[in-house]
Amino acid sequence: MNEKNFEYARSLIPATYVNQGRDAIKRRENLVKDLLTHRKIPEIGWDDQSIELFLNDLSLMDSNNFLGNSGVGEREGRIASTLVAKRHFYLAHGIGRAGDVAAIQPKAAGSSLICELTRKMAVDFIQTCGITEVKDCIVLPLATGMSISMCLLSLRLNNPTAKYVIWFRVDQKTCLKSILTTGLEPIIIDPVPEGDELNTNLGALREKLESIKREEILCIIPTTSVFAPRLPDDIVGVSKLAKEFSVPVIVNNAYGLQSGATCKAIDRAIRVGRIDMLVSSTDKNMLVPVGGALVYSPQSGMVDLVRKNYPGRASMSPILDVFITLLSMGKRELRSVLKEREDCYQYLLDRLGEVAGRYKQRVLRTPRNPISIAVTLDNPFPEDDSFEYSDEDITKFGAMLYTRGVSGSRCVGFHNKKSVGKYEFANYGGHTDHYPHAYFTSAAAIGVKKEEIDVFIDRLEKNWKQYQKDLEKKRQKKETQE
């Protein structure tokens, strides 16, 4: 409704009613004005109607929604299913063009606006989380692993003779497969034990940097969000060595944005050392469906390298999810959920300690891992030399939890041999070939509530009781047979 139409409306119904309605619409339009001028996450989240109204206006700016448009190209944004069209708010053109995944589309002004605003808000999101040194970001419609591969392939344009990536062992397949997918060879550095914790081996990193030709190393990939008892890599130490030896760094920060401690360490690493690119999952940090990743950097040139190396256009869906979520959440709620997660971590740690102690187990001391917590699953009958406590017994604990409606917990034994490509690991899942404890993990991730933790602890208690009974039966059966 423009002013002329409001004037016509006043000839149909009383002007006071029209003016009241006009003011209501203006308030929603002012939200859009603030977004377009400030280009940051709104302090207070928008209501759903305001978001839908804005999305509808933006979709009408795309050529597939023009009244009377005659499209004769090979891609005109036609959608066969009305249900699919509604699901995507009638935005059909995707993002980018053949030469740049973030390029403006002549046929899709509305979609291009969403893409640009999402990039700006994503930078604001990252800075709000605590990495203030980040200057540019792109939301790729690829999950974390493929986004890391995309970064590696883009970085290789600057050093086509490179063949190695130095990678600190983390027993989660994604990052290693990201390296293998690009045809590069990982140089794997195992962590070093420090008490219960497994920490970054900076000494081994220095040895590799000194012994391998600089031009043969494409980059170093540290990981800053991991399952306990592994610690996030010493990103400050890695960045200093990278700067000393002039080696690029791509940080696998898959779900580290939700941790203030991790973000603070990354921010310092950028200031004192070298960090080229970082990759974070959208679903693990921003409470959206799986499918996207943030690629960001303290230098705009590195993000430009990735966006211009991306082949063809890309899906709009992950970008739209982030756009809607950030508008809906607002910065105030974002700060609230980040703080709530920190509180829940301590709450989960305390509750796990209480339960574990009742079954002669303990929480592993890993205070430098701010998200994941590990609890021992050691032999409950250490005094009985005849009792065989197997990996099958350990993994059974996790299976029992799952049948009780607990997801996300991982159980790690001692002999889980696994291959990823041509690389074999003797105790996959434990981040090292020889760890002295079996254990299970749980995490206080963004969005978790204390009520969920209470339900988990209640089910864990029941699970442990039954588990102990089953192991006792196994032991008694063994004694009877002997």
Image (spheres, rainbow, N blue to C red):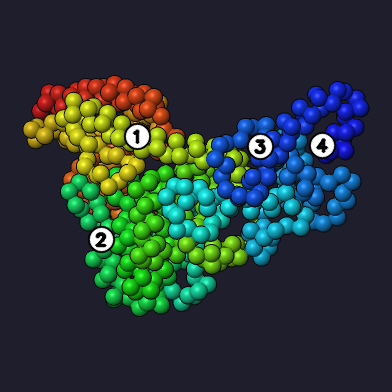
Of label 2 and label 4, which has the lower sequence position?
4
Q: Are marks 4 and 3 in contact (CB under 8 Å)?
A: no
Q: Does dot 1 land on a helix, a strand or a loop?
A: helix
Q: Position of residue 364 (x, y in %)?
A: 22, 40
Tag 3: residue type? Ile
Q: Which quarter of the picture shows residue 394? A: top left
Tag 1: residue type? Asp
Q: Which of the two marks, 2 or 4, is nearer to us in this view?
A: 4
Q: Which of the two marks, 4 or 3, is nearer to us in this view?
A: 4
Say how many tags the image has.
4
* Residue at mark 4 to residue at mark 3: CA–CA distance: 17 Å
Q: Residues within 10 Å of mark 2 (few under 14, many from 20)?
A: some
Residue shown at 19% from the left, 34% from the top: 362
Between residue 171 and residue 373, name the one nearer to us.
373
Q: Are marks 2 and 3 in contact (CB under 8 Å)?
A: no
Give the number of the disc on residue 343: 1
Of label 2 and label 1, which has the lower sequence position?
2
Side (left or right) of 33 relative to 479: right
Of label 2 and label 3, which has the lower sequence position?
3
* Residue at mark 2 to residue at mark 4: CA–CA distance: 63 Å
Between residue 50 and residue 197, name the one nearer to us.
50
Of label 3 and label 1, which has the lower sequence position?
3
Of label 1 and label 4, which has the lower sequence position?
4
Residue shown at 90% from the left, 25% from the top: 12
Position above or below: 355 against 53: above
Q: Which residue is mark 4?
A: 1
* Residue at mark 1 to residue at mark 4: CA–CA distance: 47 Å
* Residue at mark 2 to residue at mark 1: CA–CA distance: 30 Å
Q: Residues within 10 Å of mark 4 (few under 14, many from 20)?
A: few
Q: Which residue is mark 2?
A: 201
